[in-house]
Image (cartoon, rainbow, N blue to C red):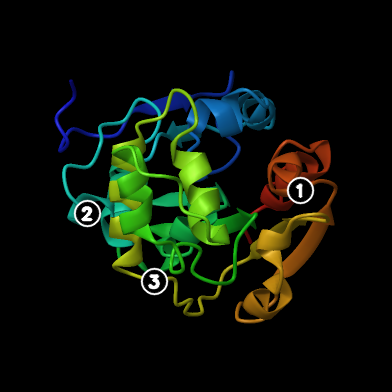
Amino acid sequence: MLSSTAPLSVRSFAPAGAPSGPPVLLVHGFTSDGATDWLATGWPQALNAAGRTVVVPDLRGHGDSPAPSDPGQATPTAMVDDMIAALDGAATVDVIGYSLGARLAWELPHRAGLTVRRMVLGGLSPVEPFGAVDLDAVRAHLDGAPAPADGPSAMITAMVTAPGLDSRALTTCIEGLREEPFEPTTFDLPTLFVAGAADPMTAGLGELAALIPGAAVVEVPGDHLGALRSNEFRSAALDFLAVPEH
């Protein structure tokens, strides 16, 4: 078993020739992993074809990365620290984050020593997604109690108990993430927001995007999962990242 303080599982993909820009960090969503959100949908291949190096970590408690031993290892601050460590010293990056990955990516421009050139934020909820979850009821269900009936808690229970997932590690992640609720502060860099046309989680995204000078918002087909897998999302992101530095 991996130590809870071990580094994240990270996959890297290099282009055939010289890179055409900084590496691209791909950050997956809650209860998913890098292979599911990015590799299975062809993102590394598409970015490599565009001349980009790609870095795909599994967040702590997800995929092949170690589970957090306590909530302090799963706060947004700790998870962003992990993401920066996954970059292996890269000083400038482009970032594509989806859902929880987008929420965490929001913190990267505020970190000293790292320059985010351009950022794509997909499937981002403008409100803290875990605040209304009855975590005690979720954990009680893991011990055999009935599943919670309220909407947010029932949804999260279904997510963390899906086959193949470490349910207790994911509840620890929720506890850590709730220690630092999403309170977006502005930054100034080219940013593209992407929302599925049938994704209720992104309701109000335009108001969030208004915090970022010059940000663009693109609507693509699909619900929360469908938007991530849409060709339109990938094309919009590739076009946005292809803009050269001035």
Position of residue 169 measured from the top left corner of the image (x, y, whole percent): 29, 39
Position of residue 111 measured from the top left corner of the image (x, y, whole percent): 34, 65
The label on residue 81 is none
Residue 119 position (above or below residue 161): below
Residue 31 position (above or below residue 40): below
Position of residue 168 measured from the top left corner of the image (x, y, whole percent): 29, 39
SS category of the residue bearing label 2 = helix
SS category of the residue bearing label 1 = loop
Whole-number angstrom distance, CA of label 1 to CA of label 2: 30 Å
| Res. 34 in view | yes
Nearest the eye: 81 or 198 = 198
Question: Which residue type does callout 1 highlight?
Answer: Asp
Position of residue 141 measured from the top left corner of the image (x, y, whole percent): 37, 43
Whole-number angstrom distance, CA of label 2 to CA of label 3: 14 Å
Is residue 128 left or right of 245 when viewed as pictured?
Answer: left
Mark 1 vs 2: CB contact within 8 A = no
Nearest the eye: 118 or 218 = 218
The label on residue 223 is 1
Quadrant containing the N terminus is top left
The label on residue 181 is 3
Q: Residue at x 55, y 75 (%)?
A: 188
Q: Residue at x 73, y 75 (%)?
A: 206
SS category of the residue bearing label 3 = loop
Question: Which residue type does callout 2 highlight?
Answer: Pro
Is residue 129 left or right of 141 when viewed as pictured?
Answer: right
Quadrant containing the C terminus is bottom right
Q: Residue at x 52, y 32 (%)?
A: 53
Q: Estimate how packed mark 3 is, as few (under 14), some (14 to 19) or many (20 or more) residues with alpha carbons within 10 Å.
A: some
Q: Which residue is mark 2?
A: 71
Of pointers 2 and 3, the one earlier in the residue sequence: 2
Q: Estimate how packed mark 1 is, as few (under 14), some (14 to 19) or many (20 or more) residues with alpha carbons within 10 Å.
A: some
